Amino acid sequence: MILFLTTSAAEGAGFLLPLLIMLVAAKVMAELFERLRQPAVAGEILAGVLIGPSVLNWVTPSDFTNLLAKIGVIFLLFSVGLETRPAEMFRVGKRAALVAIMGVIAPFGAGVLLMRLWGASGVEAMFVGTAMVATSVGITARVLSSLGLLETKTARIILGAAVIDDILGLLVLAVVTSLASGSVNYTALILTSVLAIGFTAFVALVGAPMVTRMAPRIENLRVSHALFVASLLLCLGLSAAAAYIGVAAIIGAFLAGLAFAEASEDKPTMRQQMSGVTEFLIPFFLVNIGMLLKLEVFRDRWVIALALLVTLVAVLTKLVACGLAAQGLGWRRAGQIGMGMVPRGEVGIVVAQIGLALAVLDQKLYGVVLLMAVATTLIAPPFLRVLYANEVREMKTDPVNGDVQ
Amino acid sequence: MILFLTTSAAEGAGFLLPLLIMLVAAKVMAELFERLRQPAVAGEILAGVLIGPSVLNWVTPSDFTNLLAKIGVIFLLFSVGLETRPAEMFRVGKRAALVAIMGVIAPFGAGVLLMRLWGASGVEAMFVGTAMVATSVGITARVLSSLGLLETKTARIILGAAVIDDILGLLVLAVVTSLASGSVNYTALILTSVLAIGFTAFVALVGAPMVTRMAPRIENLRVSHALFVASLLLCLGLSAAAAYIGVAAIIGAFLAGLAFAEASEDKPTMRQQMSGVTEFLIPFFLVNIGMLLKLEVFRDRWVIALALLVTLVAVLTKLVACGLAAQGLGWRRAGQIGMGMVPRGEVGIVVAQIGLALAVLDQKLYGVVLLMAVATTLIAPPFLRVLYANEVREMKTDPVNGDVQ
């Protein structure tokens, strides 16, 4: 009887169940991970592994889940851009730039070298190297914020450097993605680099101030929530434009976020509306990431060995290269900055997924990169707490900078 | 060269362009309609007609746009539920209930009768009748709010009655939808009605107080924006449950909104987050509605004649039946209440689309219902301003209830 009834009214409602399962799994695991003082992002990816074909097989990756993931990652990069203050990069100046540049060159070079020695092809090696480039600013920022240390000099250098290396990482991705098209066309490669850099420079230098200047006029429009709507349109528009000129759509989304970062700084309503969209859509990206992981690749001990090796290189290169770049501040601070740059997270994961989608990375390398991205994110926070122990103690006993508790 | 580049990086970014075009068109038309003092909803539907196959053919209705529309309508009904105060229904009491019930029976009866006389089948007639049932509370509320008259007794009766007839309308829809499955199975029909009423009663009487009681505990969860996330999960969960027990998914979404209405009353963050999701997703529903309209059906003069006739009946039945129900308050107030109940809008449009999807309504009848829903929405506001002219004057000269201007 029930079956008879559902055929009519449930028609076309079949998309609801995967949507529901993905969101419930993501949020339950996020809650669990937060309680274990681990990053929610890792929990949401693990949720995907659990409900995906590798374990429970409740939801199968499909065109539909891929589409949701693509929309999710666009809003993920938009929100990363929205949290990025171009002004911060300039404020901490040369030191942050040096930390960022060293922190891009070392992991990329070491990653490519390691993979080549392992016997990977040039394009495979460059994709893994690219995934090792970009620091995930969110994890470190959350740790430092929970310690009440966001205003320290090292924190500001870390955040500034993370912003710069996000941009550098996306540029490397733009170049490597176009390389991955198969035939290495150097004219096309240079054109892509120039387009990517030009696009980034234009949005950052011209677009952002323009949006900031136009914001009051946008808010005066009759259409409801005009500023929020304008940011949605710019996000989709620049994503489409980026895809059209041949760089990843997410770069456009990131730049759109960047353009609205300053204009939305004192607009809590707009930010909360955007957080509603991102809280809803990003989990589909993270869960899909997990669903695409074939756990059986780790039955191969060489894959586990490679994953551990890549993770080790990813940690050491950031720690040493960024630490050296900040060495003028003393060894302890250099260590804080080096460790602060270790978590990869989102951008590394995005690179892994693009590599899989372009068939540049196979299932094994996808697993390796994913494990590296998640592992660096889990490793850094406890070390950061240890490295900042002195500052936390000082703050507690110094009545000027903090309350005695 | 550009083409060569796009093949790699733009791969799978093809969904961005229809997304962008739909959202831009919707918001430009919404802005235009707001400036002309017309409802934005009508503008967004017209945007769909313009970019759809009937006129410019920039975007073709596809599985993808249908999917977006389905997600959009779920959040539309969720937000309608969220704006519904069950307490309001009880406060204005019997008068509102009488207005609502008369306002359901008269248009449904007259609509079915008219369609049967026109030669339509029983199921067609019932679908058109159902589309004529539910008042769109949003339009009237916005007019009264712009006049500063939301606190008047007639306004409260209109809003209370609109809430009740939303629920009655959705119940009628549940029954008619299950009827539309083709074979009229009376046992199944009764079962659906009982399930729909039981489901509604359970959520309204048990679910809503439970959510309100549990809200502080939900907010204490570690997962970020827990209350908002919980409302998303309940929305998707009840939608899936409604589809499973054989009533339209949107009824579950509406009830989920209803369940969170009280709990979220003093939670501006959660409401703004939800408004972000709805502002983003609802336009896809409205634009899709317009895209599905084949303008050429109006080349048939009989279709235009029927559309005008249905619109006339839709206006007169609400005006007369609701006016009579409120007649004890004096004729002027009865007229205000009757006219306040005229706009159909969203729910009528939802019924039209379900009818089209179930192949119960053909393109012509879809056009007729759509025109009625939009026309009643455009007709009511100017009349309301005239009918409330006295109150507006009084308020301006009465220093107790309003400022002298």
Image (cartoon, coloured by chain):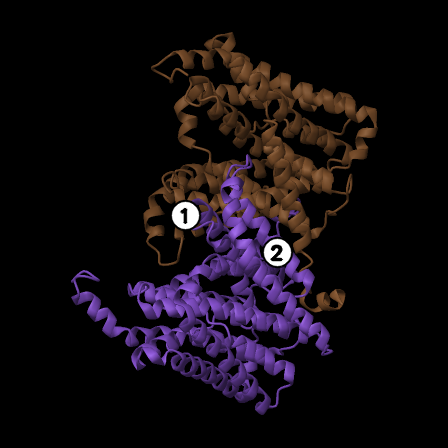
Chain colours: A brown, B purple
State whether discs 1 and 2 lie on one chain. yes
Where is the N terminus of chain A found, in terms of image quarters?
Answer: bottom right
- Amino acid residing under circle 2: Leu
- Amino acid residing under circle 1: Asp
Total marks placed: 2
Instruction: Tell me if residue B405 can be seen.
Output: no
Q: Residues within 10 Å of mark 2 (few under 14, many from 20)?
A: many
Residue at image position (53%, 28%) is A137
Q: Residues within 10 Å of mark 1 (few under 14, many from 20)?
A: few
Query: Height in image: A158 above or below B296?
Result: above
Chain at numbered mark 1? B
The answer to whether B310 appears left or right of B159 in the picture is: right
Instruction: Residue B235 in the image: state x and y as whole percent.
Output: 58, 54
Picture disc at residue B195: none
The residue to which callout 1 is attached is B266
Residue at image position (56%, 37%) is B223
Picture disc at residue B238: 2
Instruction: Residue B213 in the image: state x and y as whole percent.
Output: 51, 46
Chain at numbered mark 2? B
Q: B393 or A339, which is in the foreground?
A: B393
Q: Secondary structure at mark 2?
A: helix
Residue at image position (21%, 62%) is B401
Quadrant in the picture for residue B30: bottom left
Query: Height in image: B361 above or below A358?
Result: below
Instruction: Residue A97 in the image: state x and y as whole percent.
Output: 48, 22
